[in-house]
Image: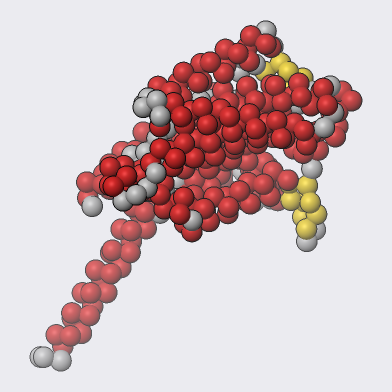
Amino acid sequence: MSSTVPAKAQSALRRINIRQMAGKLVTEYSFVLSFTLLLVIGAVVNQNFFSWANISNIFVQSCIIGLIALGMSMVISAGQIDISVGSQVAFIGGFGVLVLNGTGSAMVMLIFCAAAGTVVGLTNGLLISKGKMPAIIATLAMMAALRSIINHFGSGGPFTVDREYYDQFRQIAAGSVNLFGLKIPYFMIIFIAMTIIFDVVMKRTRLGKHIYAVGSNEVSARLSGVNVDAVKTATFVITGLMCGIAALLYASRTTAVAASNAALMFELDAIAAVAIGGTSMLGGRGKIWGTFFGVLMFSIIRNILTAGDVSTFLNGAISGAIIVLAVLLQNLNKRKR
């Protein structure tokens, strides 16, 4: 009898461990399950879904929003929000095209876009950290101001790349690297490389640890010697820099930046990708690779809608629904913990 008790206990423990592992997979890595489900649906709807042409196209569609979402992951992990990112892309991209047309150099345009994004991000950060403004109010004001300025200078129309620079500039978006017989788009390389960099920063550096500390408990972080204002400002500066790079890529892909509707609702897609990727909307917890998969999931959803001949006008509704669902699941998991 006594010999059978340990065996029963071990069996019970194994069942408990399996249950705990399954629960952790569902709560902490639900984006993996969602991503896998979307792959299955995509394969059913589109017989060419797993072709290299389609996979690379999904990455190309994901890159611009992906760069913005990586910066947004930092901001939200610090307990903040930035709803000005779409207007930043339109503002920087529009004036960036003027710089390109004036200088004929994509490198000069890149420097301008990166600098402009950094300045806008720094302004947001200072308004929030030093001006003590709520992040949503400061970035709402920035969103309105930037969109208004670019509309004024563009008269609501497009900023178009001059024909003499068109082909060369377009290669940034259309170009690729041949590797093992596959054409790997520049956009795909940029998105994956930036994701790796952000993941290392958030996991391995002091800045990443401080971002999570500030987002988790700002008062405790300050008492622990963390420069809370500097950390907050840094997240907005980095997000602004990502918007600057995204603006150049956006201009290269479209070869024209429409002042009135360029990058419209990009902030919604970025926030939704961060939410579905497992980053807490209240700050303190984040997953860079979760954001990476979250962005890909949105591109896959659009891919499925297109293959199923469903109106792409539903993208906004889907993004909004995903944000609501992700936050509700986060609240449920928080109550369980």
Q: Residue at x 59, y 37 (%)?
A: 242
> Outermost residue toward the right?
164
Question: In the figure, 17 relative to 51: above or below?
Answer: below
| Nearer the observer, 23 or 249 | 249
Left or right placement of residue 187 versus residue 82 in this view = right
Q: Residue at x 85, y 34 (%)?
A: 168
Q: Residue 220: image x %, image y %?
A: 27, 47
Q: Is residue 54 visible?
A: no
Question: In the figure, 269 relative to 158: above or below?
Answer: below
Q: Residue 49: image x %, image y %?
A: 63, 47
Snapshot quadrant of residue 248: top right
Q: Residue 239: image x %, image y %?
A: 54, 36
Q: Residue at x 33, y 64 (%)?
A: 21
Q: Is residue 238 visible?
A: yes
Q: Total marks drawn?
A: 0
Question: In the figure, 166 relative to 50: above or below?
Answer: above
| Nearer the observer, 247 or 110 | 110
Snapshot quadrant of residue 20: bottom left
